[in-house]
Image (spheres, helix red, strand yellow):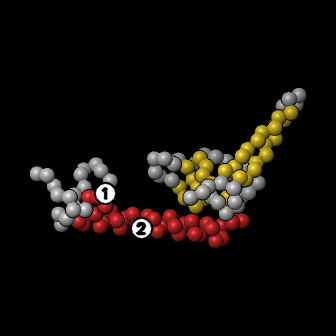
């Protein structure tokens, strides 16, 4: 999936010490952007709507935002896609766990369930 980025440029007038920050949206306005959890989104020239809080190791502490002017339909589609992925992952893990109970698959302790586990037998 493609993501947009926000480019921030700070201009400083040296004799007075006044700073001014300009922001530029790089990418399509319908693309989501990933920012840190403690980033200030109130000062941006666009209103952003949070659509997903990341809990995985790669994006931990990050939030995905979509611009408010592109929320319908892109934000709704992004949310639906995330929910479908969560449901499919949950059903998949339950399916593998059921196969483990019926001794039709074996997932070693501490590993992530996978399709490769189907048909494996326990080594006693």
Name which of mark 2 and mark 1 comes first in the sequence: 2
Q: Which residue is mark 1?
A: 113
Image x and y of residue 24, in percent: 75, 50
Q: In this rendering, does residue 100 appear at all?
A: no
Q: Is residue 94 left or right of residue 57?
A: left
Q: Residue at x 67, y 58 (%)?
A: 48
Assign a secondary structure to mark 1.
loop
Q: Is residue 95 above or below residue 55?
A: below
Q: How many marks?
A: 2
Structural crowding at the residue carrying mark 2, measured as other residues with C-alpha within 10 Å and reported as few (<14), some (14–19) or many (≥20): few
Residue density around tag 1, few if under 14, some if 14–19, many if 20 or more, within 10 Å: some
Question: Which residue is at a point 45% across and 65% down the rendered structure image?
Answer: 85
Q: Disc number at residue 87?
A: 2
Q: Name the residue located 61 percent from the left edge and 49 percent from the top edge.
A: 35
- Give the residue at x 44% y 64%: 86
Residue 43 lies, in percent from the top left, at 74, 50
Relative to 100, 85 lies left or right:
right
Query: Which quadrant would residue 97 be assigned to in this image?
Result: bottom left
- Please state which of the two labelled residues, at mark 2 or mark 1, is closer to the viewer: 1
Q: Are marks 2 and 1 in contact (CB under 8 Å)?
A: no
Percent across and percent down for residue 118 are: 25, 62
* The furthest residue to the top: 15
Work out whether residue 14 or residue 30 is closer to the camera in this orientation and state it.
30
Q: CA distance from mark 2 to mark 1?
A: 15 Å
Q: Nearer the viewer, residue 15 or 94?
A: 94
């Amino acid at each position: 999936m493609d993501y947009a980025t926000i480019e921030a440029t700070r201009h400083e007038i040296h004799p007075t010490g006044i700073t001014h920050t300009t922001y530029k949206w790089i990418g399509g306005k319908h693309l989501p952007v990933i920012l840190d959890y403690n980033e200030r989104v109130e000062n941006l020239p666009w209103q952003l709507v949070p659509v997903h809080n990341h809990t995985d190791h790669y994006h931990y502490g990050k939030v995905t935002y979509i611009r408010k002017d592109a929320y319908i339909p892109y934000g709704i589609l992004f949310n639906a896609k995330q929910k479908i992925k969560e449901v499919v992952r949950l059903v998949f893990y339950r399916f593998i766990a059921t196969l483990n109970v019926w001794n039709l698959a074996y997932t070693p302790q501490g590993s992530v369930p996978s399709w490769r586990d189907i048909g494996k037998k326990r080594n006693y």
